[in-house]
Amino acid sequence: MCELLAMSANTPTDIRFSFTGLSQRGGRTGAHTDGWGIAFYEDKGCRVLHDPAPSAESELARFVRAYPIRSLAVIAHIRKANRGRVALENTHPFTRELWGRLWCFAHNGQLKGVKALPLGPFTPVGTTDSEHAFCWLMGELRARFDRRPSEARLRKAVAELFARLRDLGVFNALLSDGMSIYVSCSTRLCYVERCAPFGPAALIDEDMEVDFSQETTPDDRVLVLATQPLTRNETWRVVAPGSSLVLKDGHVTPL
């Protein structure tokens, strides 16, 4: 299985600490050696980096671990391939434009029969089931709404489409337009909320600790979601299997 990472914050925040922990699972403390990717949103723009090399060894991942890119919404993925060869075009997150914004998508799991789902105007570049699911999902949203709907209507539609994909198998997934991060949980996801009073956090997969009280203001709020906990001294809450969430400004809400 692949592993997912997402961050939602109410002030531009860098994800170096969490990404450092996740990236070690790509070949050093875990077997997710078939590529990695990360997307950082900045206003309407999005920086997306991919590498089919293991994240624990990748020079590009080393750059991300060192460079303080600040964002309100980030999604990342480390891959253990089961469908689709190890190649740059098969690394997540995948991106498409819809309603004048860039949408990013990352997925963990297998979906039986997903390639039987008819595609609209969005076409996969690679060969993964995940990208096919993403293109189908984007096409369904475009077919339902000519322009971006209200947030309530969009959340309802995303929840319905996520549920349809969960019916096909394991669909742990992240979908974002930079304003919100929509989350589907089939089997295993968890999250930690960081807000005042901030304290120290120590990674599980690397000898690294940060005292967030020295890095934040009392008004900051950050939520980090991952497949498995990344720190050993924080309280990670388990997401209920079969549910969908939305992350926005460091808060989590059921879909």
Image (tube, helix red, strand yellow):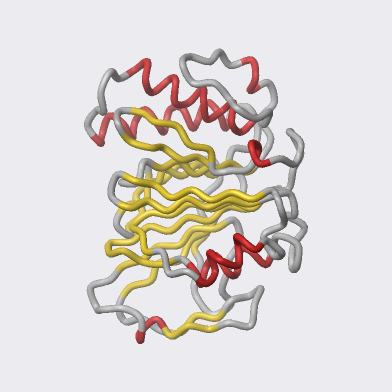
x, y (%) of residue 123?
Answer: 54, 21
Q: How many marks?
A: 0
Does residue 230 lie above or below 188 as drawn? below
Does residue 33 lie above or below 232 as drawn? above
Decide if residue 19 is on the left or right side of residue 129: left
User: Residue 141 appears in which quarter of the rendering?
Assistant: top left
Judge whether residue 159 can be spotted in this image: yes
Residue at the spot 36% in from the left edge and 41% down from the top edge? 177
Judge whether residue 186 can be spotted in this image: no
x, y (%) of residue 248?
Answer: 32, 52
Residue at the spot 51% in from the left edge and 22% down from the top edge? 136
Q: Nearer the viewer, residue 148 or 35?
A: 35
x, y (%) of residue 110?
Answer: 69, 35
x, y (%) of residue 33?
Answer: 75, 54
Does residue 86 lie above or below 132 as drawn? below
Residue at the spot 67% in from the left edge and 61% down from the top edge? 58
Q: Considering the image in quadrants, where does the C terminus appear?
A: top left
Q: Nearer the viewer, residue 233 or 24?
A: 24
Does residue 240 lie above or below 232 as drawn? above
Residue at the spot 22% in from the left edge and 31% down from the top edge? 150
